[in-house]
Image (spheres, helix red, strand yellow):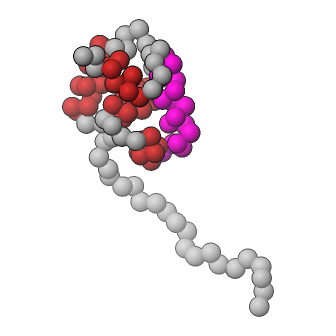
Amino acid sequence: MSRGKPSHYGPAFHPVPVEREPLVTDEEVKLLCDIRNRAFLSVKLTSRELEVATLILKGIPYSEIGRMLNMSLKTVRTHAFSIYSKCHINCKDEFFYFIFPT
């Protein structure tokens, strides 16, 4: 018996496009516009940071945000740190107070 590579790897895999729900609903777009108008006028966030910020505000954990946006946990944390730095805050809790002051 040979220990080399098998001569056949099976049929080629061709992914089929799958329809899925948009990541952001119309209500979330309205919230996002409100957030941008209220708090981010002086803060220049990239579109990806804005996506991450919206999901953070929905209370989604970083690991789930990574799965949703197809990025690593480290990348999500990097975006979050960048968002917090630009807002001159240090953590997720402060971010909520920054967006929704009481």
Q: Compared to 95, does 78 lie above or below?
A: below
Residue 32: image location, x then y, percent: 30, 24
Residue 73: image location, x then y, percent: 52, 42
- Figure quadrant of the N terminus: bottom right
As for residue 97 lying within the magenta part, the answer is: no
Identified at 49% across, 63% down, the residue is 14
Identified at 41% across, 8% down, the residue is 42
Q: Compared to 70, does 18 lie above or below?
A: below
Highlighted range, magenta: 70-86
Identified at 37% across, 33% down, the residue is 56
Q: Compared to 35, does 71 lie above or below?
A: below
Identified at 37% across, 14% down, the residue is 40
From the image, give the main secondary structure of the stretch colored magenta. Answer: helix
Residue 23: image location, x then y, percent: 33, 40
Q: Can residue 69 be seen in this view?
A: no
Say how many tags the image has: 0
Residue closest to the far bottom: 1
Q: Compared to 82, does 5 lie above or below?
A: below
Residue 74 relative to residue 92: left or right: right
